[in-house]
């Protein structure tokens, strides 16, 4: 999937959690930081791709991205597995713990969960693509849904651009329309 689809899928997943789960009282800063972390999590597994937005936005990023890509086994390898999920979760938690003293009003547990929801949504959406995802590395099998590769989505293809992305956009808008009071309550308590 493309970065914009991953970001929207991550935001949609976070919105579903916000609707269906009891939310603790949190500051507005936590809400904003959590949404940002969720969007970063939505594209984080693609850090293994040298052309990822993360590398493009750094001055020497393309060179570092190529080296990093080779070092971790290429695209859709470690970062697209349960091992990668654990690594992302651990590193993100360590970063948040390090930053906690400079942002005392931010609930890092909520921010951590928002990031992880983004990462998980990335892996789930990539499971629907032709390439699949190696969920159980070191077992070198890429899982995909549906099981027949011919019925899966081509990343960046017509189905993603004309059906999946607009469908997610409409669904997310519908969630906010039908659960407006819930989201308003979240911001009133922030």
Image: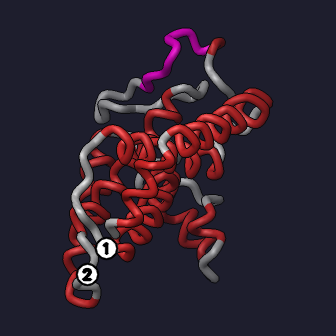
Decide whether residue 152 is among the magenta residues.
Answer: no
Secondary structure found at label 1: loop
What is the C-alpha distance between the residues marked 1 and 2? 7 Å
Is tag 1's residue or tag 2's residue first in the polypeptide sequence?
1
As rendered, which of 120 and 136 lies closer to the eye?
120
Work out which quarter of the rendered image holds the C terminus and state it. Answer: bottom left
Residues at circles 1 and 2 in contact by the CB criterion of under 8 Å: yes
Horizontally, residue 95 falls left or right of residue 178, namely: left
Residue on which the image places disc 2: 105
Percent coordinates x, y for residue 134 in the rendering: 40, 32
Q: Which residue appears at 45% of the width and 62% of the height?
A: 35
Extreme-top residue of the structure:
148
Percent coordinates x, y for residue 127 in the rendering: 49, 28
The tag on residue 19 is: none
- Which residues lie in the magenta part? 142-149
Work out which quarter of the rendered image holds the N terminus and state it. Answer: top right
Secondary structure found at label 2: loop
Above or below — where is 94 with respect to 178? Answer: below
Q: Which residue appears at 50% of the width and 58% of the height?
A: 39
Residue on which the image places disc 1: 27
Q: How is the image coloured?
A: secondary structure
Percent coordinates x, y for residue 117 in the rendering: 37, 47
Query: Residue 9, located in which quarter of the rendered image?
Result: top right
Q: Which is more foreground, mark 1 or mark 2? A: 1
Which class describes the residues within 10 Å of circle 1: few (<14), some (14-19), or many (20+)?
some
Q: Which residue appears at 57% of the width and 67% of the height?
A: 54
Above or below — where is 141 with respect to 122? Answer: above
Q: Which residue appears at 65% of the width and 25% of the height?
A: 153
Above or below — where is 59 with respect to 91? Answer: below
């Amino acid at each position: 999937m493309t970065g914009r689809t991953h970001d929207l899928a991550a935001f949609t997943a976070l919105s579903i959690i916000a609707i269906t789960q009891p939310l603790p009282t949190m500051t507005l800063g936590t809400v904003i930081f959590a949404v940002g972390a969720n969007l970063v999590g939505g594209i984080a597994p693609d850090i293994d791709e040298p052309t990822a937005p993360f590398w493009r936005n750094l001055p020497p990023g393309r060179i570092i991205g190529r080296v990093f890509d080779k070092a971790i086994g290429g695209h859709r390898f470690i970062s697209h597995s349960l091992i990668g999920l654990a690594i992302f979760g651990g590193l993100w938690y360590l970063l948040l713990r390090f930053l906690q003293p400079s942002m005392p009003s931010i609930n890092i547990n909520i921010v951590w969960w928002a990031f992880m929801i983004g990462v998980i949504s990335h892996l789930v959406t990539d499971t629907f693509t032709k390439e699949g995802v190696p969920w159980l590395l070191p077992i070198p099998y890429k899982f995909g849904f549906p099981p027949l590769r011919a019925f899966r989505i081509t990343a960046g293809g017509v189905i993603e651009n004309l059906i999946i992305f607009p469908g997610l956009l409409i669904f997310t808008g519908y969630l906010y329309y039908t659960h407006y009071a819930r989201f308003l309550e979240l911001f009133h308590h922030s």
